[in-house]
Image (spheres, coloured by chain):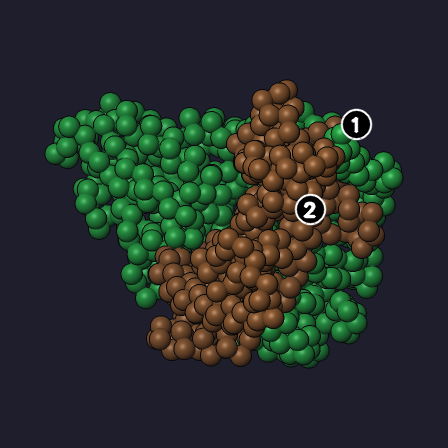
C-alpha cells in the first residue's frame, strides 16, 4: 500500500472512529421540553418591547398579567383573572379597581407581587421611552395602589377593550419593579416575572434555558426544564424534529411542510390563531389609485381562493373582511367582490386604461410575501394589470413602504383581536403614512373615521360592534383595501407532549407553555 | 498573497542571514501600518454603508405597531438622532479605545457577542482546514503521481463535485445520511454540553461539510503544483542518485510545491471564516458568519460595525501569517 493511500485511509478511519466510540443521544427526561424556534437569537425580553414572534413566545412563559386569555384561546370573551382575583368598574367604565391575589411570588426569590409592581408596570407601559406600546395606554390618567393588594386605574376617556389592555399581551404584562431597577439595561436579557417558567441561562445564538418556577401560584409546572433552541433554518429545524432532538418545532407556512409533518410518525401539527390577515393596500393619494374604478378593478382581479389553495387550505383561508376574522366586531359580510377578470378589464377601460395598466409594487423578499406577490402578479395579468414587482430585502421594504414609495402594498399582520386595533392602525386617517401619528395606513383611507372614533367611546357593546361593522363596510366599498387571505400559526410537536388545553389560539404567536404541559408516559 | 511585497530571489544570499531578522521586523512594521490603514478605511466604509442602507433598527426593535413617539424615543436612546458626523466621531473614538459598544438589538456588549461565537468559528475553521489539508494534499499528490490513470480521473471528478456542490446542499445530504438515517451524529451541532465526545460528534458533520470543499481546492492545486515540480531537473537528479520513490515525491517534490498550496490555504482560510455562514445556519451552529448575517438583516449597526472590524483584523492577520510562512517554507523568499 502506498503512503498516500495509507494517509487517506488513516484520515477516513480517524473520522469514522469518532462515531464508533460514541453513544446515541440519550432519550430526554420526560420533564424536559426541547423547543426548536425559528429565530437566530434572543432579542428583547422586556415584555413591553418584545416584538419578534420568538421573543413574544418566550415572554408569555415568563410573565403574567392582571388578567389573561384562557390558555389556548384568543377570544376576548374568555378573558379571566390572572394576578387579579376580581375587578369592578364604575358605570361609565372610567374607574377600574382590581383586587390582587395574595401570595403570588416573583421568580428568582424577589418576593411577593404587590400593587406597587402593578402600578410601576402599567406606568412603564404607558411611557414611550420605556415601552413600544405606550400609545395603547394613552387613556390611562392615573394608576394607583389603594393598598398592597388593590390597584385603581382611572381613565381619561373610555377605551374599546379595557381588559384587553391588561391581558398577557404586550404592555399588559406585569414586571418585577425591584428586579427591573436592580438590573437596569440587563433586565432585557434577565427578566423576572411571576409566570410558570423562569430564565435560567442563555447561550447566545444557541439556546435559552428555562426552569420551572416552583413558587408559581397555580402550582408547580409539570415540565421542569425548557431548552429553547435557536434553529433559524427551516431545513435544520425540521431535521432536528425528525431526529427527535426537539419535541416542538416552529412550522413553515407551506403545504409541503404540512404534508411532510403529517407523514412523520408521531408528529402532531397545531394550527392556531391569530391568523395573519394579508391585505392589498391601494394608495388613494397616488395615481392610478386615486381613481376608484382602478381600485375596484383590482378587487375584481384578485383571486384569494386560489392563493389560499396554493399556500395550503388547512392554514390559509380566504379572508372575510378587512380585519382578521377572529376580531371582536368582525363584519362577516362587508360586501367583498367576487373574482371576475372580465369586470376588472371593463372597469379599467372605463377608467381610461383600455390597454391595461402597469403598476409598480415594492415587494418584500421574505418567502411568504414573495410567494403571494408572484401569484398576484399572475392573477392581475389576466385582467390587463401588469404588476411591476420590485423585490427588496425585508427590513428595507418596511422602511420604503413607510415612505409611500409603493402605491400598492401587500401587508400581513395579526393584531389584538378587537376590531378597534386593526381599524385604527390600518384605516384611520391619523395613522396614515406621513401623519404625526403614522402607523400602517398605507392607503390613506379615511372613509370610516367617524365610525372608528364613535366606537371607541360607545358604552353599549352591541352598538359598538355595529359601528365597527359599518366601518368595514365603508372601507370595502371604497376599495382602499382589498383583503386576500388569513394565515394561521403552525407548529409541530411529538404526540407524547400534551399542552394541557386545546390549542386553538395563542396571542404570543407560539404555543403557551403553562403549568399543565406534560409528556405522556 | 498580500500586497506584493514578497519576492523570491534566484539564490539564498548567506551573507544576509544576519540581517534577515531586521528585514522581517521592518516588513512586519510596514504591513502592520498598512493593516491599520486598511482597518480605518473599512471602519469608515462600513459606518457609511450601514447608514445608507434603507431599514431602521428601531422598527426591528419595536415592531411594526410602534408609534412615531416610541420610535423617536428609541432613536434618541441609540444616538441615531445625532448628526452623522457626531455619530462617526463617537464611533471612531470608542473604537480607538477598544470599545465596540453594545448590540442595538440584544443590548449585549459587542465584545461579548463576538467572543460568544468566536470559539465556534475558530474550532470549525481549524478542524475543517486540518481535515481538508490531511485529505487534499495526499489526494493531490496521488493524482499527480498517477496522472491520467484511474485514481487521477476519479480524484479530479471528486474535486470537481466538491467545487460545484453548494455548501448547504452538501450539508443537507450529510445530515440526511449521517444524522437522520444512520443516527451517528446529531442534527443540532452546538450547545447542550461540555463533554469532549459530544463536542466532537457535534463538530463532525459541519467539519466534514467544509473540509470536503477545502479538500477539493487543495487537491487540484497540489496536483498541478506537483505535476510542474515532478518534471523539473532536481527531481530527475534525486531519482538518479537513488532516492526512494517516497523521498522523491514527499520530500523533494512536495516540499517544493508547498508555496502555491500555502497560498490557497491562506486564501481559503480567510474566506472560510466568513463564508461558513450557510454551514452554520444549516447545522444550527453559532458563528461569525451567522452573526454578521443576523446583524445585517436586523440593521444592528453597532454589531455589524464591530463584526466587520473583527473580520478585517482576522483576514489581515491570516494574510500576514501566510506571507511569513512563505519564508519558512522557502528560504529563497525575501521580505522587502
A301 up-or-down from A48: above or below: above
The residue located at (29%, 30%) in the rendering is: A380
Work out whether disc 1 and disc 2 sit on a shared chain: no
The residue located at (60%, 73%) in the rendering is: A185
- Chain shaded brown: B
Residue A99 lies left or right of residue A128; in this view the side is right
Question: Depth check: A518 or B333 in front?
Answer: B333
Q: Residue furthest top?
A: B150
Query: If the image is split into quadrants, where does the C terminus of chain A sit?
Result: top right
Question: Depth check: A289 or A185 in front?
Answer: A185
The residue located at (66%, 61%) in the rendering is: B116
Residue A250 at what x, y percent from top left? 62, 42
Residue A473 lies left or right of residue B287; in this view the side is left
Estimate the spatial distance between the alpha carbons at disc 1 and disc 2, rounded to whole Å.
23 Å
Write down the residue under mark 2.
B130
* Res A1 label: 1
Give the drawing colour for chain A. Answer: green
Residue B65 at what x, y percent from top left? 45, 58
Q: Secondary structure at mark 1?
A: loop
Amino acid at each position: 500500500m502506498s503512503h498516500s493511500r495509507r494517509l487517506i485511509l488513516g484520515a477516513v478511519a480517524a473520522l469514522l472512529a469518532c462515531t464508533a466510540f460514541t453513544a446515541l443521544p440519550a432519550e430526554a427526561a420526560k420533564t424536559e421540553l426541547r423547543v426548536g424556534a425559528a429565530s437566530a437569537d434572543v432579542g428583547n425580553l422586556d415584555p413591553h418591547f418584545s416584538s419578534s414572534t420568538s421573543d413574544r413566545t418566550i415572554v408569555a412563559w415568563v410573565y403574567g398579567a392582571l388578567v389573561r386569555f384562557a390558555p389556548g384561546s384568543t377570544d376576548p370573551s374568555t378573558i379571566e383573572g390572572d394576578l387579579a382575583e376580581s375587578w369592578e368598574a364604575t358605570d361609565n367604565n372610567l374607574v377600574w379597581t382590581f383586587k390582587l391575589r395574595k401570595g403570588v411570588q416573583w421568580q428568582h426569590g424577589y418576593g411577593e407581587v404587590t400593587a406597587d409592581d402593578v402600578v410601576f408596570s402599567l406606568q412603564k407601559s404607558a411611557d414611550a421611552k420605556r415601552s413600544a406600546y405606550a400609545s395603547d395606554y394613552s387613556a390611562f390618567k392615573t394608576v394607583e395602589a389603594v393598598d398592597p393588594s388593590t390597584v385603581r386605574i382611572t381613565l381619561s376617556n373610555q377605551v374599546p377593550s379595557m381588559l384587553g389592555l391588561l391581558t398577557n399581551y404586550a404592555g399588559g404584562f406585569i414586571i418585577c419593579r425591584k428586579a427591573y431597577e436592580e438590573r437596569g439595561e440587563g433586565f432585557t436579557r434577565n427578566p423576572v416575572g411571576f409566570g410558570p417558567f423562569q430564565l435560567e441561562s442563555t447561550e447566545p445564538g444557541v439556546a435559552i434555558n428555562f426552569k420551572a418556577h416552583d413558587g408559581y401560584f397555580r402550582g408547580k409546572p409539570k415540565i421542569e426544564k425548557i431548552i429553547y433552541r435557536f434553529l433559524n433554518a427551516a431545513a435544520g429545524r425540521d431535521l432536528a424534529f425528525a431526529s427527535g432532538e426537539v419535541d416542538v418545532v416552529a412550522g413553515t407556512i407551506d403545504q409541503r411542510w404540512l404534508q411532510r409533518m403529517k407523514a412523520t410518525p408521531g408528529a402532531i401539527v397545531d394550527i392556531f390563531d391569530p391568523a395573519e390577515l394579508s391585505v392589498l393596500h391601494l394608495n388613494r393619494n397616488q395615481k392610478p389609485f386615486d381613481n376608484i374604478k382602478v381600485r375596484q378593478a383590482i378587487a375584481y382581479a384578485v383571486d384569494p381562493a386560489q392563493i389560499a389553495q396554493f399556500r395550503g387550505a388547512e392554514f390559509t383561508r380566504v379572508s372575510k373582511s378587512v380585519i382578521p376574522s377572529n376580531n371582536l366586531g368582525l363584519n362577516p359580510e362587508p360586501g367583498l367582490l367576487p373574482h371576475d377578470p372580465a369586470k376588472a378589464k371593463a372597469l379599467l377601460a372605463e377608467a381610461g386604461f383600455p390597454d391595461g395598466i402597469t403598476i409598480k409594487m415594492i415587494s418584500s423578499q421574505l418567502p411568504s410575501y414573495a410567494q403571494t406577490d408572484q401569484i398576484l402578479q399572475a392573477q392581475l395579468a389576466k385582467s390587463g394589470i401588469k404588476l411591476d414587482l420590485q423585490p427588496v430585502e425585508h427590513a428595507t421594504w418596511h422602511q420604503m413602504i413607510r415612505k409611500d414609495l409603493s402605491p400598492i402594498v401587500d401587508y400581513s399582520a395579526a393584531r389584538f383581536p378587537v376590531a378597534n386595533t386593526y381599524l385604527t392602525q390600518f384605516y384611520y386617517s391619523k395613522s396614515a403614512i406621513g401623519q404625526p401619528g403614522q402607523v400602517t395606513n398605507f392607503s390613506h383611507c379615511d372613509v370610516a373615521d367617524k365610525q372608528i372614533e364613535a366606537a371607541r367611546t360607545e358604552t353599549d357593546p352591541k352598538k359598538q360592534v355595529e359601528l365597527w361593522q359599518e366601518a368595514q363596510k365603508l372601507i370595502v366599498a371604497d376599495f382602499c383595501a382589498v383583503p386576500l387571505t388569513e394565515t394561521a400559526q403552525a407548529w409541530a410537536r411529538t404526540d407524547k407532549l400534551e399542552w394541557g388545553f386545546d390549542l386553538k389560539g395563542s396571542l404570543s404567536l407560539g404555543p403557551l407553555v403553562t403549568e399543565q404541559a406534560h409528556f405522556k408516559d | 498573497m498580500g500586497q506584493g511585497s514578497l519576492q523570491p530571489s534566484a539564490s539564498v544570499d548567506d551573507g544576509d542571514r544576519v540581517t534577515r531578522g531586521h528585514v522581517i521586523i521592518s516588513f512586519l512594521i510596514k504591513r502592520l501600518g498598512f493593516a491599520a490603514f486598511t482597518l480605518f478605511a473599512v471602519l469608515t466604509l462600513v459606518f457609511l454603508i450601514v447608514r445608507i442602507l434603507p431599514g431602521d433598527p428601531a422598527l426591528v426593535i419595536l415592531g411594526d405597531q410602534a408609534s412615531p413617539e416610541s420610535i423617536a424615543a428609541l432613536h434618541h436612546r441609540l444616538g441615531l438622532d445625532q448628526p452623522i458626523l457626531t455619530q462617526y466621531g463617537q464611533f471612531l473614538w470608542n473604537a480607538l479605545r477598544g470599545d465596540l459598544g453594545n448590540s442595538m438589538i440584544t443590548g449585549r456588549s459587542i465584545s461579548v457577542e463576538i467572543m460568544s461565537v468566536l470559539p465556534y468559528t475558530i474550532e470549525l475553521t481549524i478542524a475543517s482546514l486540518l481535515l481538508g489539508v490531511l485529505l487534499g494534499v495526499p489526494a493531490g499528490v496521488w493524482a499527480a503521481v498517477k496522472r491520467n490513470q484511474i485514481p487521477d480521473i476519479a480524484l479530479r471528478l471528486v474535486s470537481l463535485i466538491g467545487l460545484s456542490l453548494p455548501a448547504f446542499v452538501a450539508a443537507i445530504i450529510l445530515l440526511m445520511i449521517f444524522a437522520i438515517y444512520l443516527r451517528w451524529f446529531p442534527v443540532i451541532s452546538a450547545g447542550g454540553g461540555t463533554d469532549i465526545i459530544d463536542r466532537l460528534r457535534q463538530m463532525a458533520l459541519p467539519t466534514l461539510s467544509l473540509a470536503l470543499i477545502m479538500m477539493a481546492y487543495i487537491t487540484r492545486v497540489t496536483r498541478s503544483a506537483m505535476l510542474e515540480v515532478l518534471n523539473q531537473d532536481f527531481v530527475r537528479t534525486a531519482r538518479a542518485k537513488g532516492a526512494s520513490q517516497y523521498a522523491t515525491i514527499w520530500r523533494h517534490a512536495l516540499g517544493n510545491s508547498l508555496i502555491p498550496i500555502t497560498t490557497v490555504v491562506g486564501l481559503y482560510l480567510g474566506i472560510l471564516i466568513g463564508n461558513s455562514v450557510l454551514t452554520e445556519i444549516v447545522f444550527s451552529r453559532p458563528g461569525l458568519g451567522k452573526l454578521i448575517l443576523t446583524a445585517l438583516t436586523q440593521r444592528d449597526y453597532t454589531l455589524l460595525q464591530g463584526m466587520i472590524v473583527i473580520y478585517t483584523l482576522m483576514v489581515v492577520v491570516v494574510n500576514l501569517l501566510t506571507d511569513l510562512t512563505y519564508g519558512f517554507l522557502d528560504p529563497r523568499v525575501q521580505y522587502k
